[in-house]
Amino acid sequence: MAKQQHFHIVVLGQTGVGKSELINYLTNEPLRATGAGLPVTEKGFHATDTKIADMVVTITDAWGIEQGRLAEWQKSFNKFQKNHSIDLVVYCIDASTARVQATDQHLITEMTQTLPVIAVLTKANTLTQQQIYDMAQLIPCRTIAVNSKAERYFDGTASTSFGRERVIDAIRTYYQAPTQQRRFLGGIRFGKNK
Ligand SMILES: Nc1nc2c(ncn2[C@@H]2O[C@H](COP(=O)(O)OP(=O)(O)OP(=O)(O)O)[C@@H](O)[C@H]2O)c(=O)[nH]1
Ligand SMILES: [Mg+2]
């Protein structure tokens, strides 16, 4: 098994949900390419040693899950998991659709059996509190709403980014936990959904 030097965070989720953008937002660095249109992050798992606030981490940006390629994705993730120790999975779900898909529910449920997992609802800036709450109820782990990118829209309105501190606080809970406790924290629902 490859030895992980630092606390290892792996960012997973379907293509286009904002995994790479979240990494840039959390690290405050333009580390990963992002974009609309075709899938951006290439097949595989792309690790970078960096810092999130004062935490020294390795953060891995994943190939996004594409429709019709779930089995292929799972095979490649299983292989990755066998060869790397993972301290925390950050599983991203696009909140802008106001839907939680069964694929994401199943994958999170499966992963929480063996790994600590937190979920991030990305692009959450257009949703109401109630919508965020309703989505979080369907996700079997701690869930945090985020907008990774402040931007201007076609209609002239703008959004501000939010959620960074909450995600950092959640990461810190695991970062500070002794190794044996991390798995336990992953298996139970703790902390308040926000
Ligand atoms: N407003 C807003 N836009 C976001 C957010 N997260 C991502 N985006 C945008 O959504 C698009 C897709 O984001 P990416 O980070 O490239 O998505 P990804 O999950 O890495 O996609 P793949 O690499 O294809 O798997 C980009 O145009 C991002 O700028 C968010 O929280 N808010
Ligand atoms: Mg990407």
Image (spheres, rainbow, N blue to C red):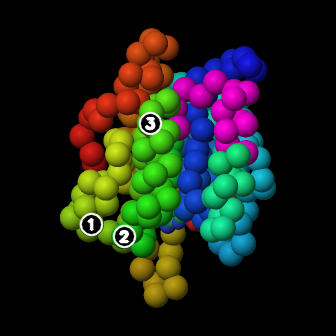
Q: Which image quarter is the N terminus in?
A: top right
Alpha carbon separation for disc pair 1 and 3: 24 Å
Q: Which residue is mark 2?
A: 98
Q: Secondary structure at mark 3?
A: loop
Which image quadrant for residue 50?
A: top right
Alpha carbon separation for disc pair 2 and 3: 23 Å
Q: Residue at x 56, y 54 (%)?
A: 13
Find the magenta span and give its range: 76-89
Q: Residue at x 76, y 47 (%)?
A: 44
Q: Nearer the viewer, mark 1 or mark 3?
A: 3
Which image quadrant for residue 80?
A: top right
Q: Is residue 38 magenta?
A: no
Numbered mark located on residue 112 in the image: 3
Quick one: label 2, few (<14), some, or many (20+) residues within 10 Å?
A: some
Does 47 appear above or below 136? above
Residue 137 x, y percent position in the rendering: 26, 54
Q: Nearer the viewer, mark 2 or mark 3?
A: 3
Residue 97 x, y percent position in the rendering: 42, 73
Q: Is residue 171 left or right of residue 22?
A: left
- Quick one: label 2 or label 3, which is nearer the N terminus? 2
Is the Cβ of the residue at disc 2 closer than 8 Å to that at disc 1? yes
Is the Cβ of the residue at disc 2 closer than 8 Å to that at disc 3? no
